[in-house]
Image (tube, helix red, strand yellow):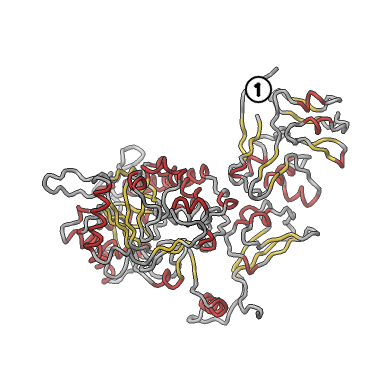
Amino acid sequence: MARSIMTPAFKIERDEDRCIQCGVCVRQCANDVHHQDEDGWMWVDDEKCVACQRCAVLCPTRALSIKEYPIDFRSNQHWTSPTIREIYAQAESGGVLLTGMGNPRSYKNFFDHLLLNASQVTNPSIDPLREPMELTTYLGNKSQNGSEGEKPQLELDIPIMFSAMSFGSVSINVQKSLAAAARELGTFWNTGEGGLHSDLLGYGKGAIVQIASGRFGVHPDYLENSAAIEIKIGQGAKPGIGGHLPGEKVSQEVSRARMIPAWSDAISPAPHHDIYSIEDLAQLIETLKVATRYRKPIAVKVAAVHNISAIASGVVRAGADILVIDGFRGGTGAAPMRIRDNVGIPIEMALAQVDSRLRDEGIRSQASLVVTGGIRNSADVLKSIALGADAVYIATAALLALGCHMCQMCFTGKCNWGIATTRADLTKRLNPIIGSRHAINLLTAWSHEIKEMMGGMGINAVESLRGNRLMLRGIGLTREELDLLGVKPAGE
Amino acid sequence: MKVVALPEYCLGCGLCEIYCAAQHDGWNGNVLKAFKKGKPVNRSQLMGSSQWCWLNTCMHCTDAPCVNGCISGAMQRDPDGTVYVDTERCVGCFTCVMLCPYGHVRPWQEKHQVIKCDLCRDQKGIPACVANCPNGALQLLVEEVDAG
C-alpha cells in the first residue's frame, strides 16, 4: 500500500510553553490523535483529528489549538480545497462519502433575508415583563366535522419541540437529557426510529414516537405509551434514501430497544414497503388511529422536495393531524455527502408554499404544520411561525446545547462528546443532569427572546403571529422569491 | 462535608488531579505555574480505567480511623468536620495509611509524611476538583457535622 496522497484536514498546534504533559488530551481523544511516550513527550497524529475540539476544551492550560491544515492548493474557484480532498478520499477508498449533521453549503439562507416588524406610535408595543404573553400552542386537527367532536391535540407550552433522534444514532444520555428537558419545558421530544429504551418508559407520555420504514421497536405498548405517533417518510438531510445504523453501533441495549439482533446492521429501507401512494399512507394513518383508539394525533414527516405542496396536500387529505416538513439544512447521524449537499429545497420556501396551498384548498385547519431543518435561533422560530408554521422542531441546536462541536463525524460512533455514540465509556461523558439543564436553559432563553420580539410587534399571543406574513419583509430577494415566500420587500 | 465521586459520569480525564495538585502547596490554583515551576502533588487520586473510574477522595469519616490512630496528633478534624494533616506534626509513621478503610490516605515519600484531601480548606469556595470536573462527576455533599 502506497503512502496516502491525502494531507491531514486539521493541524493540532501544541504550545510547548503551556503544555504540562498532564495527558488529559491523550485520555480524552477517542480518535487516538494524542499520545505520550515513555519519556513524557507529547505526540499528535494530525491525520486522525476531526476537529471535535474535545482536547482543546478540556486542556487545563489552553495549550492546544486546532486549525484547518495550512495546505493551500493553487487558488481555484471551481476546484476548491474540499472538492480536491473528496476526490483523493474516493480515489483511495472507492466508497460513497459519508458525513453527519446538516447541509453546510453556501446556498441562500432565506431566514437571513427576512426582517421582522416592530410597533411604533400607531400601535403600542407590549412589554413582556409587565404583561402576559401567550406561547401555548395546540397541534392537531382543528376542523370540526359533524358529530366527531374534538380531535386529539398536543398542548405545547412553547412552540418548539425536540426533533427525532433515535437511540442508536445518539446515546441514551442524549435522549435522557432531552426527555427530561421536554417534560420540564412543557413540550415534547421524539424517539426517532429506534424504539424506546426501558430507562425512558416513564418519559413515554412526553414523547412523539416514530414509525419509519424499518419499523424498529414498534409494538402496541410503544404506540400506547406516547403523546403522538409520527410516521417518518423522509428526512431533510437525505430525502429519498433510507437509514443505515452500522452494526458496530447496535449494542445489546440498542438491540433490545429496536428488537433486532445485536451487532447487526439496522437498515431502514428508502420507501415504506407498504406505502406506495397517498391511499396507502391513509391506510397506515387510519390503522394507527384505530390501534390507539383515536386518542393520539398522527404526524407525518416528509422532507422538503420539489413538489412539496402537492405532497403536503395529499398527506393532509390522507388524514395526518400534524404535517412535519424537514428542510434541506436538516441534520443526520449519517448520510451520503452528495445527497445531504444536493437534494431537497430550503424549508422557508417549502413552508410558505405548503401553508398557502393548504389555505387555498381550505384544509389548513385539518392539520398543524411543524417545520424543522436548520432552525438556529429564536428569530428563525419566529420567522417560521410568521410564514405559517404552528411549531418547530429543533435537533442540531439541541445537540449543540448538549456539547456537540459540529465535527460532522457522527457516523463513526466515536463521538468524543458522548452524543453520537453507543460506546459506554463515551456515553457517560454526557451527564444527563447537565445536558437537560443546558437544553432547558436554551429554550428558556429562546422563549424570552420570542416574547420580546412578539411584544415589539405588539402581539401578545403566538396564535396571532401564525401565518401573519405582514410581520415579515424580505431584503435582498428577487421579486420571484418574494412572491414564493408571500412577503413584501423591505420598504413596501 | 465531603466530595462524592459518581463513577457513572466520571470521564477519567484527570482534571481533578491536576487542579487538586495546583490548589495546594502555595500554587493557588495556577496550573501552568505549578507544573512548569514545580512538581505539584495531588491529594486525591483517580482510580480505575476509562470504562469504570472514579476519584478516590476522603470520606471525612465522623469516627475517622486515621484521626483515632494517629500517634503524633497530626491527623485532625477541624470544626467543620474536615479531616486534615498538620504537616508540622506528621512524623511519617504511616499508621493512618494502613487504617484508612478507603485507601485514600497515602505516603508522600519525598517529605516522609502522609498526604490526603483537605477539601481545599485553605481556599475560598468549593474544592478545586469539584469546581473543575467537566461532567458533574464530583459533587460536594454538605451534611450536618456530628461535633462529638
Q: Position of residue A392 (x, y in %)?
A: 34, 53
**x then y, percent, for residue B7:** 62, 42
Element under label 1? loop
Q: Is residue B18 left or right of residue A208?
A: right
Report in which chain the residue with disc 1 lies. B
Answer left or right for A239 relative to A145: right
Q: Which residue, as the protein is rendered here, is positioned at the far left?
A: A146
Q: Which residue is mark 1?
A: B145
A417 in relation to A48, above or below: above
Q: Nearer the viewer, residue A229 or A140?
A: A229
Kind of residue sitting beneath label 1 = Val
Residue A128 in view in this figure = yes
Q: Looking at the image, which residue is at 49% across and 51% down?
A: A401
What residue do we see at 78% from left, 25% from top? B67
Which residue is rendered at x = 30% and y = 65% of the image? Answer: A349
Percent of width and height locating residue A409: 53, 63
